[in-house]
């Protein structure tokens, strides 16, 4: 699966992406989104999950592999919408970007990355921080659009 991330005002607005043919990021305002899609290839459950543990602490009870984060999917399950847990969205929004960047070297050591690229992860950390702040300010959420 490939994953894009975006901010939306609600689950319903996020789910509307599945109804859009082609590239759902072409006109986010028309889809009612709060942001453009961030296409960075960071996997939702394991790769983002590892970053979440670095941010929230290893004793956190967050598990991004739980089905509870999936809010919608196409019948063939080749396209899905996943909700980033609100506790993680709030933590990222409230954390200083320099601290998030300081976690990138440890994040890049995650053994299941297909390609360990700290520069790409730093850019993603910056983009995710922006998405989380946008979502928090609008009382919305951050979502991932997964597609095969």
Image (cartoon, rainbow, N blue to C red):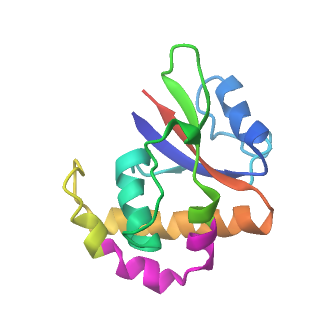
Q: Position of residue 145 (x, y in %)?
A: 55, 39
Q: Look at the image and tell me in which quarter the N terminus lies.
A: top left
Give the residue furthest to the top.
76
Is residue 135 visible to the viewer in this orientation of the structure? yes
| Left or right of 64 on screen, residue 70 | right
| Left or right of 67 on screen, residue 138 | right
Query: In the figure, 4 relative to 15: above or below?
Result: below
Main SS of residues in magenta: helix
Residue displayed at 47% across by 59% down: 61
Does the magenta portion include 139?
no
Q: Nearer the viewer, residue 110 or 64?
A: 64
Q: Quadrant of residue 124?
A: bottom left
Q: Position of residue 110 (x, y in %)?
A: 24, 60
| Left or right of 118 on screen, residue 70 | right
Q: Position of residue 117 (x, y in %)?
A: 26, 62
Q: Quadrant of residue 142?
A: bottom right
Query: In the figure, 66 relative to 78: above or below?
Result: below
Is residue 36 visible to the viewer in this orientation of the structure? no
Please tell me how many numbered marks the rendered image carries.
0
Q: Position of residue 107 (x, y in %)?
A: 30, 67
Q: Which residues are magenta?
A: 90-104
Residue displayed at 41% across by 73% down: 57
Q: Look at the image and tell me in which quarter the C terminus lies.
A: top left
Residue displayed at 44% across by 47% down: 44
């Amino acid at each position: 699966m490939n994953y894009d991330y975006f901010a939306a005002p609600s689950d319903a607005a996020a789910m509307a992406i599945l109804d859009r043919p082609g590239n759902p990021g072409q006109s986010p305002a028309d889809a009612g989104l709060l942001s453009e899609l961030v296409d960075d290839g960071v996997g939702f459950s394991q790769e983002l999950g590892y970053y979440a543990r670095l941010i929230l602490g290893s004793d956190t009870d967050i598990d991004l592999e739980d089905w509870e984060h999936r809010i919608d999917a196409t019948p063939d399950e080749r396209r899905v919408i996943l909700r980033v847990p609100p506790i993680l969205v709030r933590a990222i929004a409230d954390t200083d970007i320099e601290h998030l960047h300081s976690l990138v070297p440890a994040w890049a050591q995650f053994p299941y990355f297909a390609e360990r690229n700290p520069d790409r992860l730093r850019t993603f950390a910056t983009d995710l921080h922006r998405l989380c702040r946008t979502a928090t300010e609008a009382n919305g959420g951050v979502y991932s659009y997964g597609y095969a």
